[in-house]
Amino acid sequence: MALLPIITLPDPRLRKVSQLVERVDAEILQLLDDMLETMYEAPGVGLAAIQVAVARRIVVVDIGKTEEERSPLFLINPEVVWASEELSSYNEGCLSVPDYFDDVKRPARVRVRHLDRAGEMQEFDAEGLLATVVQHELEHLEGGLFIDNLSRLKRERVVKKFAKAARMDEIVAQRRAQAAPQSEEAEA
Ligand code: NI
């Protein structure tokens, strides 16, 4: 297994619509294992493949709070086939929008259909935190982010903050790159 780099806002790949998985082969199983390890390491309770820059309809979820409570869900081509009218609100966060949390309302209960690791069709009902996490991850597959559910003002504030941070990182990287040849000469 291997840890995969998680992409963050404003990386434009987060806005890609993910493609259906046609066959659950060894490559997909490897990706599922790597995604799960990456999610546990982060740590997070859900991860969509696009967050590791793979535009496939693949999600891993585990809302277990401790290692003993772990029970990972591997969702391939997941879809919500039923959602309750009743909504519930959770303070959500996202590994691709680090250190930002806000309340999002979503259906309180959903039924999810997906392929499992054996390529078999499965269905399960989710409520509470699990329902929220699954819907949050499925949103990623459509190129969405949880901040899309916030008011325009809030969303723009978050997007601006991350764009500015990315520009600062770029400037620092450029300065380092400019400084690097000199230090190499000095060492030569
Ligand atoms: Ni997320």
Image (cartoon, helix red, strand yellow):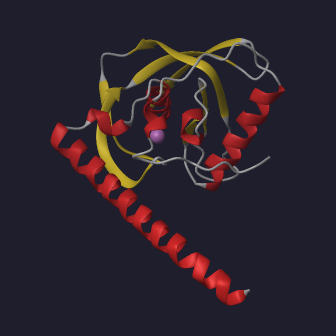
Query: What residue is shown at x 29% (from left), y 42% (from top)?
Result: 103
Residue 186, image quadrant: bottom right
| In front of the other: 113 or 51 | 51
| In front of the other: 92 or 34 | 34
Query: What residue is shown at x 78% (from left), y 35% (from top)?
Result: 30
Eyeballing the image, is 17 above or below 64? Answer: above
Residue 144, image quadrant: top left
Q: How many marks?
A: 0
| In front of the other: 56 or 99 | 56
Q: Is residue 32 left or right of residue 62?
A: right
Residue 153: x and y in percent read 16, 43
Q: Residue furthest left?
A: 153
The answer to whether residue 95 shows anywhere in this view is yes
Query: What residue is shown at x 72% (from left), y 35% (from top)?
Result: 31
Q: Is residue 81 left or right of residue 6?
A: left
Quadrant location of the C terminus in the rendered image: bottom right
Eyeballing the image, is 105 above or below 68? Answer: above
Q: Is residue 78 left or right of residue 132?
A: right
Q: Residue furthest bottom?
A: 186
Residue 137: x and y in percent read 49, 32
Residue 108: x and y in percent read 37, 26
Query: What residue is shown at x 46% (from left), y 73% (from top)?
Result: 175
Residue 120: x and y in percent read 74, 12
The answer to whether residue 132 shows anywhere in this view is no
